[in-house]
Image (cartoon, helix red, strand yellow):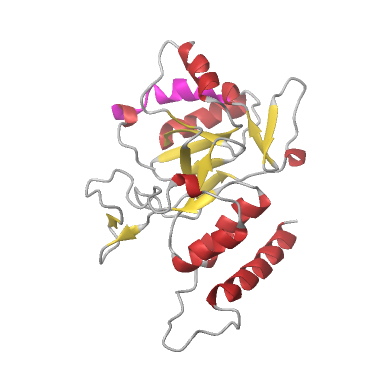
Amino acid sequence: MREILGRRLQRLRYRLGTRSWSRSGRTAPGQSRPPAPAPALLDAALTCATAWQWPVLPGVGRSGADSSRCACPDPDCVVPGAHPFDPGLLAATTDPRMVAWWWTNRPTAPVLMATGGAAPCAVSLPAKAAARALVRLDAQGMRLGPVLATPTRWSLLVAPYSLERLGELLYAKDHVPSSLRFHGEGGYVLLPPSAASSGGQVRWEREPQAPERVRSRPGDRVAAAGGIWLPEVEAVVDALVEASSGAPGGGSRLAY
């Protein structure tokens, strides 16, 4: 299935790429072609948008001679390069033509997924705490969904939830550490293989899987968004709260 999807994406990239220059496929006199998009970033964006139906948009990216500064106007940006700016988050789409146009014109832009609605939501926490939480959840026999990882933070994708539902869940907790963050409606997460704001790249610690590839047991709560298996937020939050409570410094910086 992965080979079939790869061939489809390759054909889609070719068709959309050739149409984006001109109807004849040639560059007009005096007009320069935009740089070719990085295949890995474009393929990742198209996979999310077309295969999984997750709305995506390009991150603002970095600027400067050494690409160390965020391209946004804020000189103290806490997530340099890894947030929406222009276009804004509301522009996130699953339209492959728009996705191809974005990454043709901004070939190194990070890939962002808008969370909530029909798309997955996420819970993120410091990397070391997340690794501990995954060990605990695995020991409990929990079926986890995709897990995103950067050198500083990991994000567990979960089934879509409403703010009201999340509020009720957290209200029942004695303590929710500040290092634990929730990405629901109106939020976003950075997807592989984008560059992380804290250095390194985003990667899949656990890759997305279709529901039929996950063996569930009686009593398991299973949800799917865009054909990808996701756990409910209630199923994982206890382990994440406990793991985050010991995170040094409380995780006040929004580093991805």
Q: Quadrant of residue 234?
A: top right
Picture layout, residue 101 above or below residue 152: below
Q: Is residue 127 left or right of residue 117?
A: left
What residue lies at 75% left-to-right and 30% top-to-bottom?
Answer: 216
Residue 25 image position (x, y, % from top left): 59, 82
What residue lies at 54% left-to-right and 31% top-to-bottom?
Answer: 134
Report the front residue among 170 and 146: 170
Q: Is residue 235 left or right of residue 69?
A: right
Q: Is residue 63 left or right of residue 107?
A: left
Asked if residue 190 shows in the view, the reply is no
Report the front residue among 254 and 91: 91
User: Going by the picture, which residue comes out furthest to the left?
Assistant: 75
Q: Is residue 237 a member of the stretch shown in magenta?
A: yes
The N terminus, quarter of image: bottom right
Asked if residue 218 shows in the view, the reply is yes
Residue 17 image position (x, y, % from top left): 58, 72
Number of marks in the image? 0
Q: Quadrant of residue 245?
A: top left
- The secondary structure making up most of the magenta span is helix
Q: Is residue 182 a member of the stretch shown in magenta?
A: no
Picture layout, residue 19 above or below residue 225: below
Report the front residue among 217 and 115: 115
Residue 205 image position (x, y, % from top left): 54, 44
The C terminus, quarter of image: top left
**Residue stretch rendered in magenta on the structure:** 236-249
Residue 79 image position (x, y, % from top left): 33, 45
What residue lies at 47% left-to-right and 41% top-to-bottom?
Answer: 188
